[in-house]
Image: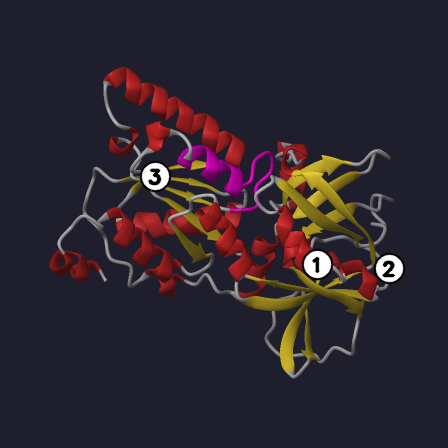
């Protein structure tokens, strides 16, 4: 099993090519449906795959959190994905996928891991509404394998949100409003949880926004804005103050979206902020290579608001700008 992720560092070369690799896994056969679904997680978020170690129960943990394990001296929470996804299975969770993203490390218990699949983000599609309703927004993208199996990419950010309770109301209380009705932020993110957090942050700042659920939709909408501005004799920067984009998105990732924006003279003067749970330096460097103006980790509303304030009001005198920090 160690060979499965042996060359994971080399996979950072995929970023910026609109490609990704996902680790396929299953949660066991659901006794209610008789089906065994195939799920996936971006390899960039996987630190290691191992046999499930002894788990120590902990009090007052969310229902799907089995307890804690000690990994190299650090206590790591362990989530039973079958329980979380409400898959009624008798399959033993003998495998643990250790994930690392958004500054958090956690273990995911699964029944089995399959292989690593390399594909283009354009092959990943937005899930049908019926599937979204059935799984409660747990899936952000789907693709079909040559053997007919449907692979569902899990929204691990949603899992983090609901098993760590990091998104409490208190983190939004100190965000200061900008009181500038002319500001508009355009943001793109495939995670419903992440979009909600961005909306709450921008609402607290008093900033208008337009949202897209993936890079392809974002680019299509931005092109419409550019065409409208051109017809009206305006600059795009008069209509869109800033673009905030995730990295991982079906159909078109954030790297490609940024490259398109930065290579199009119509979007001159519109800063692009990358907002992702992939917080490694390699990801930040790749963002800079395609023209990203700044990088902000996900799930830090206060830091996001401070970065947006600085970028949106960057032309103000320093003394006036300090009033918002």
Label 3 neighbour load within 10 Å: few <14, some 14-19, many 20+: some
Left or right of 283, for residue 319:
left
Q: Is residue 213 visible?
A: no
Identity of the residue furthest to the bottom in this view = 73
Earlier residue among tags 2 and 1 = 1
Q: Residue at x 28, y 44 (%)?
A: 207
Q: How far is mark 2 from mark 1, CA to CA?
A: 28 Å
Which residue lies under the disc numbered 1?
A: 8
Magenta-highlighted residues:
247-262
Q: Residue at x 57, y 46 (%)?
A: 248
Earlier residue among tags 2 and 3 = 2
Front residue of 10/219: it is: 10
Front residue of 198/167: it is: 198
User: Does 11 lie within the magenta span?
Assistant: no
Q: Is residue 105 visible?
A: yes
Expressed as whole percent of the image width and height from the top left, the position of residue 216 reads: 53, 31
Q: Secondary structure at mark 2?
A: loop
Q: How far is mark 1 from mark 3, CA to CA?
A: 36 Å
Front residue of 207/9: it is: 9
Which residue lies under the disc numbered 2?
A: 91
Earlier residue among tags 1 and 3 = 1
Residue 231 lies in quadrant? top left
| Colour scheme of the picture | secondary structure
Please tell me whether mark 1 or mark 3 is closer to you in this view.
1
Residue 165 higher or lower than 120, as above or below: below
Which residue lies under the disc numbered 3?
A: 209
Count of all numbered marks drawn on residues in the image: 3
């Amino acid at each position: 099993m160690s060979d499965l992720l042996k060359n994971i560092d080399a996979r950072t070369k995929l970023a910026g090519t609109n490609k990704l690799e996902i680790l396929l896994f299953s949660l066991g056969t659901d006794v209610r449906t008789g089906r065994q679904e195939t799920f996936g997680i971006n390899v960039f978020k996987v630190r290691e795959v191992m046999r499930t170690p002894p788990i120590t129960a902990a009090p007052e943990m969310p229902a799907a959190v089995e307890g804690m394990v000690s990994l190299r001296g650090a206590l790591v929470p362990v989530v039973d994905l079958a329980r979380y996804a409400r898959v009624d299975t008798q399959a033993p969770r003998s495998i643990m996928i250790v994930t690392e993203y958004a500054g958090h490390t956690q273990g995911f218990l699964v029944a089995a891991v399959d292989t690593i699949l390399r594909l283009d983000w354009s092959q990943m599609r937005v899930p049908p509404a019926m599937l979204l309703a059935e799984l409660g927004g747990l899936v952000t993208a789907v693709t079909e394998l040559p053997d007919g199996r449907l692979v569902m990419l899990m929204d691990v950010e949603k899992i983090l949100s609901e098993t760590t309770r990091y998104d409490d109301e208190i983190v939004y209380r100190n965000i200061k409003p900008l009181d500038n009705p002319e500001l508009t932020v355009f943001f793109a993110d495939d995670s419903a949880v992440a979009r909600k957090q961005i909306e709450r942050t921008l609402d607290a700042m008093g900033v208008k926004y337009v949202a897209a659920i993936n890079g392809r939709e974002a680019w299509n909408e931005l092109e419409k804005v550019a065409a409208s501005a051109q017809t009206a004799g305006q600059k795009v920067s008069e209509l869109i103050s800033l673009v905030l984009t995730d990295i991982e998105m079906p159909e078109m990732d954030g790297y490609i979206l940024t490259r398109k924006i930065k290579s199009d003279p119509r979007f001159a003067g519109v800063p692009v902020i990358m907002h992702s749970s992939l917080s490694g330096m390699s990801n930040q460097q790749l963002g800079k290579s395609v023209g990203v103006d700044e990088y902000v980790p996900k799930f830090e509303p206060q830091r996001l608001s401070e970065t947006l304030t600085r970028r949106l009001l960057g032309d103000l005198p320093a003394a006036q700008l300090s009033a918002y920090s």
